[in-house]
Image (cartoon, helix red, strand yellow):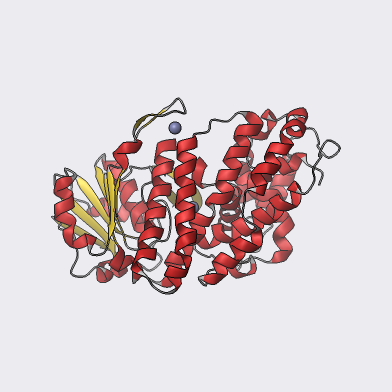
Amino acid sequence: MFVDSTVYSGDCSCGRSHDMVTKAAVIESGALFRFEEYAKRFGLSGKRCVLYDENTYAATEGRHPFGEQEIVMCPENLHANEISTAWVLERLENDVEVIIAVGSGTVHDVARFCAHERGIHFVSCPTGASVDGFCSTVAAMTWHGFKKTLPAVAPDFVIADTDIIKNAPPELVRSGVGDILAKYTALADWKMAHVLTGEYYCERIAEITQQAADAVVESLSGILSGEDEAYERVTYALVMSGIAMQMMGNSRPASGSEHHVSHLIEMGPAGLDVRFQALHGEKTGVGSVVAIREYKRLAETEDVSSHVLDYNDIPDEVIRNYFGEKLADSIIAENEKDCLSALSREALIEKWPQVRQIVASLPSAQEVYDMLEMIGAKRSLEEIGVTDRDTAAILKYSPLVRNRLTLMRVRRMLDL
Ligand SMILES: [Zn+2]
Ligand SMILES: [Zn+2]
């Protein structure tokens, strides 16, 4: 499969011009064997450093792209943080002009961050279909214990070898599916924000993301039976979702209330007992089930006129109580210019029928649950390290992790 992403560059009917850094993506069996051929085709030049962890170095044995320098990180306790990036930057030779990441999410985040620090190029070779961030322009880092999105560079191109991806640990593709099923609520939230507050919306970007979700749904039985084509399509979906984010310039099309559930659990606020951390896509998959269940419940009410409350700030002490001292200041700062304040009581009542229509177009929570179950992915809060008893608190506090308009945030103005 070949994706020419330059076709998404330039003026769009939404009124904006979309700038793509990533030129192309190749997703096929044996793609890494042909790395040089593609490198030439996409105009890659200059001294290279190839970055792996020990697992991905072993998994791609015999298919390593050529590099004047190779850096192999120890996978134990490997996180995209200040420690791993300092370790790589210390070793990275001064005249390297391109970093090639061969690995999963963490290797990619470290590589793209270091490429940004050095002002050099970056090429992506994913070894697992676990997240949609391969084409991302930002890096998801943990900086001195805090989750942060830091500036990074997007890859010039992506070379995804589906032989490697198919043989990766099965929880990776399950996580990738969870990250893509999350697009239903992410897109619904974006559409609702457009309807409710006139937030910018691009039909084309939404369509690309929707197609990514559809491609994954059609691949589920193939993943189960280990078909090459199914792995190719899931990887394609992850790449396309990343391309949509690149067109947008941020994660709006790919991340809504379900990602906020995931982020909340990852942060581990004082009021939430998190027994263990699941993979990103495992959490967003479960986040989707939780969010859709709540959205469908809210949308049962046809006329909300007697249930809409005026906008109200969340008192700082409520945030301090739940998030604890360690996180409270950053959550309070995040919500200082609450996007919900742009929504009036009247507008919410007037637009409610459109909101209900958007919710009606979502699959049911049971359908998403069944899809996750079908491939053996995590389906419930219990399975991702928290308990069902925390559901109400998760619904209430998760929107606060990101100042982005979602129906979950709008819920604060609904007495339902
Ligand atoms: Zn557009
Ligand atoms: Zn995600």
Query: Residue at horizontal 47%, vertical 69%?
Result: 221
Q: Quadrant of residue 305?
A: top right
Q: Is residue 144 visible?
A: no
- Say whether residue 110 is visible: yes
Question: Where is residue 128 shown, x and y percent of the image?
Answer: 36, 63
Which residue: 21% across, 47% down?
98
Total marks shown come to: 0
* 120 over 238 or under it: above or below: above
Q: Nearer the viewer, residue 250 or 186?
A: 186
Look at 26% across and 57% down and name the residue there: 51
Q: Residue furthest top?
A: 15
- Between 390 and 370, the one nearer to me in the picture: 370
Residue 392 vertical placement versus 166 (above, below): above
- The location of residue 84, given as percent across then percent down, is 35, 56
Residue 235: x, y in percent?
A: 37, 58
- Examine the rendered structure and indicate whether residue 271 appears above or below residue 338: below
Relative placement, left or right, of 348 versus 203 is right
Q: Nearer the viewer, residue 293 or 395?
A: 293
Instruction: Give the quadrant of residue 308.
Output: top right
Does residue 104 sit above or below 140 in this rendering?
below
* 104 lies left or right of 414: left
Please state, as top left, top right, bottom left or bottom right, where the N terminus lies in the image.
bottom left
- Of all residues, the one furthest to the bottom in this rendering is 225
Residue at horizontal 60%, vertical 28%? 198
Where residue 200 sits in the image (x, y, percent)?
A: 54, 30
| Ligand 1 image position (quadrant) | top left
